[in-house]
Image (spheres, coloured by chain):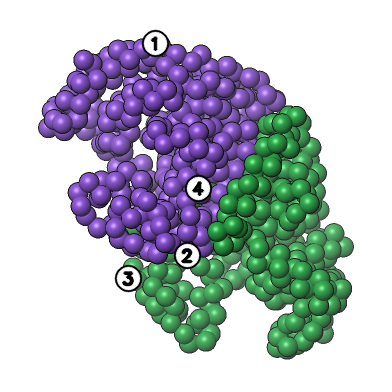
Chain colours: A green, B purple
Amino acid sequence: MIALSLQEVQELAEAILRHHGFSEPHVHAVARAVLAGERDECASHGLWRLLGCIDTLRAGKVSPDAEPEVIDQAPSIVRVDARGGFAQVAFERGAPVLVEKARANGIAALAINRCVHFSALWTELEVLTEAGLVALACTPSHAWVAPAGGSKPLFGTNPIAFGWPRTGKHPFIFDFATSAIARGEIQLHERAGKAIPLGWGIDAAGQPSTDASAVLNGAMLTFGGHKGSALSAMVELIAGPLIGDLTSVESQAWDAGSKSSPYHGELLIALDPKRFLGDAVDQHLARAEALFDGIQNQGARLPSQRRYEARERSLRDGVKIPEKLYEDLQGLLA
Amino acid sequence: MIALSLQEVQELAEAILRHHGFSEPHVHAVARAVLAGERDECASHGLWRLLGCIDTLRAGKVSPDAEPEVIDQAPSIVRVDARGGFAQVAFERGAPVLVEKARANGIAALAINRCVHFSALWTELEVLTEAGLVALACTPSHAWVAPAGGSKPLFGTNPIAFGWPRTGKHPFIFDFATSAIARGEIQLHERAGKAIPLGWGIDAAGQPSTDASAVLNGAMLTFGGHKGSALSAMVELIAGPLIGDLTSVESQAWDAGSKSSPYHGELLIALDPKRFLGDAVDQHLARAEALFDGIQNQGARLPSQRRYEARERSLRDGVKIPEKLYEDLQGLLA
């Protein structure tokens, strides 16, 4: 393993993105997202992700210098046309308008269109909870997941994320795929020649399978049976047609086998507790803390606890990445 | 079984509610909800539910003649104080304002406070999809469900419902508990002396159990492990403290063992596709239809299909209810 300080992680990420022609806003925004992933020990959204970013660029499937356009769509809707760039800059341009609209009207939506997304939604939600807002986010991906009762890939891994602000504490945030497991997890099993548990997916004939390759060529399943499947359909609808953007099937068709990051849309909804509660806001947010105590006092964990513990370690000690990954990243600077 | 026309169902429901002193708005609104449940073969939300309604009234836990107050809370938030009455009248008063605000601003929220709720969310969503809106609804209940990794009841069965309008067709609607199963299903197993499947709940010692009574005295589990648990926490937060209303623990404390319907709040969010999409709305709603085709063409079902099929049967043939239930209902008229 190679030890890196967070400063070094950021500089490495920025150097790679800059070397490949990304404009400065994209260099900074994508590097920040990658740094957050590495820092919080979400390796799949950390430095490793840069390999996919550059592959996506080489496939011509992301614009390195897109300048997002912010559109004031309605009193409580802001749209950002990412113009084919990574989602991070589009989010950064739209977020202040979303915050302003949520504060003015109580609830507001940010629709990001035509963005290339690698689905680290929690980093975006932290910006909104930091502003004191409650927030929801979701995005489709590529058609890898069968609906409950079906056998053919139709839905993406379709993450749903939710954030709740906490005074003087890390926010309550969850961010999970509506698929039973991340696709990368199945790929890791395939590479290691290991069987996967039943319930992760089915083979091309629609039969339950523990063979990672068979499932990657068949279909993944949603978490939670028909309920998870219903939620996955909801993500397709509200972060797809509702905002005039692609479903996971359509995004995959556009990808045309290049295995790039998905190109589609994202929907964020922000709610302002101050507008719901007025002067009573502190009293009611304190009752939310009682709910969190009720979870933790019985030995259960809050959804983001593992990530915050990792963050504390990384801020203190830096991070370690596999030597092979470090070499691959250095290769991107050649 | 006793055969009843839908007209007879409605008249019976209205007669019972009127006999017990409910005011005319409550008589009509609650009877409509009960009729919808019976018609759609959701027996637990049909005529059977009236027994619980009258028990709740006798326990002094619902106001029979509350006149809801509609509060224009913010440009995109309407609140309705149900003043201790059943939720249906409060929803009917708030829904037109929610529709108006969603159409004006693109997205809006309806917070119903201090209502007694029996969680038939899909009937409310049909009103909003009928108005061309996309909608989400959720509500806590009583603390019966342990968080993932815990062993003590904390969350309610916390349903989440979602609706999507379809031109010339029944809307796409799902409405499910975030618990692994409805509490009533476990009660039915208990009454029948049947074992329940593993995964529905744990006993008072926190151990997985197939004993219905042990689980009813222990804790139910959420669907989908830590993901369902996270969603259940979200419902507690956004339909509880965010709108200044009770969590499932607090609602149960207020109930004080009377086993009445829960008393708390409900949050609805409505989004107007026309404001998101402008002139392109028809083109994009057609792409949603392609997603539904993609589900049905592989033999999977849309979430509400069973309910719509039941509705068609009931509209044609009327319904049948158990003789014992019919007698119990007649008993409420004595």
In percent of width and height, residue B287 lies at: 50, 45
Q: Amino acid at mark 4?
A: Phe
Mark 1 vs mark 3: same chain?
Answer: no
In percent of width and height, residue B260 lies at: 40, 32
Secondary structure beneath label 1: helix
Q: Which callout, 3 or 2, points to the residue nearer the camera?
A: 2
* Chain assignment, label 2: A
Q: Is residue A249 visible?
A: no
Closest to the observer, B83 or A5? B83
Q: Amino acid at mark 1?
A: Glu
Tag shown at residue B155: 4
Q: Which callout, 1 or 3, points to the residue nearer the camera?
A: 1
3D distance between C-alphas at marks 1 and 3 = 55 Å
Tag shown at residue A207: 3
- Which residue corresponds to the image point at 54% horizontal and 74% vertical from the top-left? A185
* Label 3: few (<14), some (14–19) or many (≥20) C-alpha neighbours in 10 Å: some
Secondary structure beneath label 4: loop
In percent of width and height, residue B81 lies at: 57, 22
- Which residue corresponds to the image point at 65% horizontal and 55% vertical from the top-left? A173
**Mark 2 and mark 1 residues within 8 Å of each other at the beta carbon:** no
In this picture, is B212 found above or below A218? above
Q: Residue tagged by mark 2?
A: A180
* Chain assignment, label 3: A
Q: Amino acid at mark 2?
A: Ala
* Label 4: few (<14), some (14–19) or many (≥20) C-alpha neighbours in 10 Å: many
Earlier residue among tags 3 and 2: 2
The C terminus of chain B appears in which quarter of the rendering? Answer: top left
Tag shown at residue B24: 1
Q: Which callout, 2 or 1, points to the residue nearer the camera?
A: 1
In this picture, is A303 found above or below B99? below
In percent of width and height, residue B5 lies at: 19, 22
